[in-house]
Amino acid sequence: MMFYAVSLSQNSSLEYLASYLENRYGIEFRKQSLDERFSEKTVNFVKTVLSRLISEQFSSVLYSEEFLSDFNHVRIKDSTKFNVPSNLATHFKGSGGSGSTAGISIQYEFDLKTGKFLDLTITQAVRNDQQDAKETAENVFKNDLVLRDLGYFSIPVLQKIIEKEGFFLSKLLSAVSVYDENGVEIDFRKLHDSMTKSGIDKSDMQVFIGKDKVPVRLLIGLVPPEVYQERVRRKQKEDKQKGRQMTDKTKFLLNFNLFVTNVEAEKLPSEKIMPLYGFRWQVELMFKNWKSVFLIHSFQKMKYERYITLLYTRLIIVNLQIVNQVQSILSKEGLRKSILSYKKTLQTLKNSFSIILNILRFSKENAIKLLEDIYRILSQNHWREKRKKRENYVENIGLFICTSPK
């Protein structure tokens, strides 16, 4: 019943679901009795199912054994926030956006090499990304590569990753001081003038950041004037909405692309920094698909136990193990033509809900046959398309096939 309810494009009332049970299965249920089934035990059950799902995922290389082979995991993490009915404010305090008193944040982390979920956590919207980074720093292991946006930026977290012999690639927060190898703070205005006069638009240097002088590699790229002007407009609009005033330093630094990493140049040449960081956008596209295809952010007002049960059930459904297994098989047939579009495949899986449900209900032999049917469907016309003036995901993957000799 829960899987059926969350597969519907429109929210379903208890009355509708009770009617469905009677018409489809001959089970008579009053809507009050159905509502009572959503309890703390139900919540704990779906939480346990999702936890088991995450811990028992199969691990298959999605694209190639040589893809980013210098790293054990390539950890991409981001969060999505959305408002929830106000009656849930005691459980999920809102961040104040859009005047909402209740809101949810979902922290989602996956491994780019295998597609496995590494973290999928529901928290209150007031818990920010930097707090999450600090509280989950221990989850990074030796030879892991961490890709996150500026919301997670924390120098103590970067230090922790270095201590654990892991790696990171991050944009540099504008408020952070940068020092050269002699301990002298870098004047970016002078650096900008020097690079402009010399006709240099990129630089790669060893520096120290923050008051603790953490050693990192700084990648600097100048942006064209039109890009700078567009950045200023976006930043001014963003600051106005948040009631902030953009500083002169922040405005000037919009002239640069600034990245920090502790990966040596032999493993990660400077020309591959931007394509690698670009993979981080996959998690934002995933959130967009979750919302547009599975409507994870859209439920009518209901009690907490029912709401959180249905939300966790939707997160179980958006698990990509079927898609990733098909991707792994197809990649062996040729990388360039074997990158699945997650949007297309998620939409097809949603439309094939009855098939997926029967996999859970039928015998092993019938389940295998149904999985073969899904494979056949997904392997036809579900490719990621190349679009003009947009990142070519397929070509970017090709850039990282065995980036350094073994």
Image (spheres, rainbow, N blue to C red):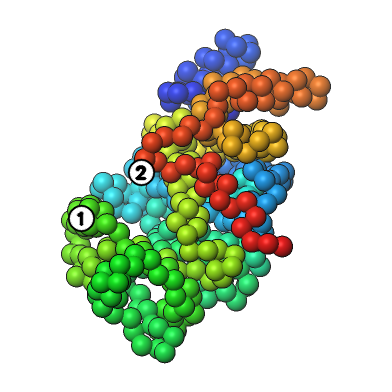
Judge depth for marks 1 and 2 and give the one in front: 1
Indicate whether 275 appears above or below 306.
below
Indicate whether 359 appears above or below 46.
above
Residue in view at x 43 percent, y 53 percent:
124
Residue 229 has which mark?
1
Please tell me how crowded label 2 is: few (under 14), some (14-19), or many (20+) other residues with Cα within 10 Å: many
Residue 274 drawn at (x, y percent): 45, 56
Q: Is residue 256 left or right of residue 350?
A: left
Indicate whether 405 appears above or below 29.
below
Answer yes or no: is residue 231 visible.
no
Residue in view at x 47 percent, y 18 percent:
16
Residue in view at x 65 percent, y 55 percent:
402
State the SS at label 2. Answer: strand
Among the 4 quarters of the image, the one containing residue 292 = top left
The one of 170 and 258 positioned closer to us in this rendering: 258
Q: CA distance from mark 1 to mark 2?
A: 32 Å
Q: Which residue is mark 2?
A: 83
